[in-house]
Image (spheres, rainbow, N blue to C red):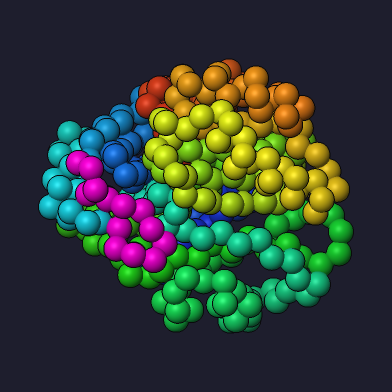
Amino acid sequence: MATATTIRQTLSQNPWVLRAARWMNNVPHPNLAIEFGMERLTIARWGKPGTSVNCVVESLPPGALVPSAVETNIINGEAVAAALGSACKKLSTNDEDVTLLLPDPVVRVFLQHFEEFPRSAREALPMLRWKLKKSLPFDESEAVLSFMRQTQGGTGCDVAVAIARQRIVREYEALVESVGLKPGVILSSCLTAVALQEGPNPTLLARVSDKSLTTAIVCNGVLQVYRCTELSVHGRELTPQALLEEIFPVAAYYQDTWHNEIQGVMLAGLGARWREFVGLIESELRCPVRSLLESAVAGGQIPGEARVLARQELEGMAGWMLNND
């Protein structure tokens, strides 16, 4: 059984895999979560299925929080702490465990294949650190790392690895501790949002968050491609052509590597604008394009009491809550 302490010492438990494996029951699952972004932070609490979800969103001043895998994230600590304190007061938090959903650029995700992979974490972690150290933008000794084996056919073992810089994770932990909360599970927002994707066919998720774009391809519950890039403009200024230019090479790479074609695209983070992107992307990728949140609501994955999260474009929070059912 995992404990909140041991989870705090890692970074991620890769919920898209956990959900498929039903291992989630062994992971501490606070019913309180905080999601951080450049322009806002959100805190939400939920109870048993069928009970209401309480959600508070607080705006952040420009430049107060700048997501990065390498550099300091919380630039204006006083402003971010004030926003978090206000949100916690409105939600009446008090000495509780809390899940932290960090901005996507903070967490690096690598997908690795091994012909043979150790069964014990004690043996696997040093191997992964050694294999990935040249791919990290900071010293390997500063890395907080977690991994998950992915189940699929074929030989060998495919492993998803999530890595962040320890001192940056600590920035968020210290901030949360300053308002009397206890940080437990720590994830990136897109890794939880991926849980809203279902079905056996290869589906590409394009998630825009502030000035970052995260692209993930999932097939039958297995994460096969993951990429996070910085956009040249804010998401609200992104054009259909610019988004297509970002995701087309990912789809082409997937086709060449996995010898399969994308059969659907999910868009997130574009608000009501997502319909502007449908025509061009459908014509180029030749597959249907839908809104991740609207599809999850229509399909009943997001229950009625949690639709407040969908209305606020909180797909990461909704995905984490879904895994709590």
Work out whether residue 187 or residue 276 is closer to the camera in this orientation and state it.
276
Q: Is residue 272 left or right of residue 218?
A: left
- In the image, what residue occupies the spot 47% across and 70% down? 137
Q: Position of residue 67 (x, y in %)?
A: 36, 53
Is 91 part of what is drawn in magenta?
Answer: no
Q: Is residue 135 left or right of residue 107?
A: right
Seen in the picture, residue 98 relative to 43 is either above or below; the reply is: below
- Magenta portion: prevailing SS class: loop
Q: Is residue 218 visible?
A: no
Seen in the picture, residue 12 relative to 316 is either above or below; the reply is: below
Q: Is residue 45 left or right of residue 195?
A: left
- In the image, what residue occupies the spot 86% across and 64% down? 155
Seen in the picture, residue 279 relative to 36 is either above or below; the reply is: above
- In the image, what residue occupies the spot 23% across and 43% down? 62
For the record, the magenta segment spans 61-73
- In the image, what residue occupies the spot 69% across and 46% down? 249
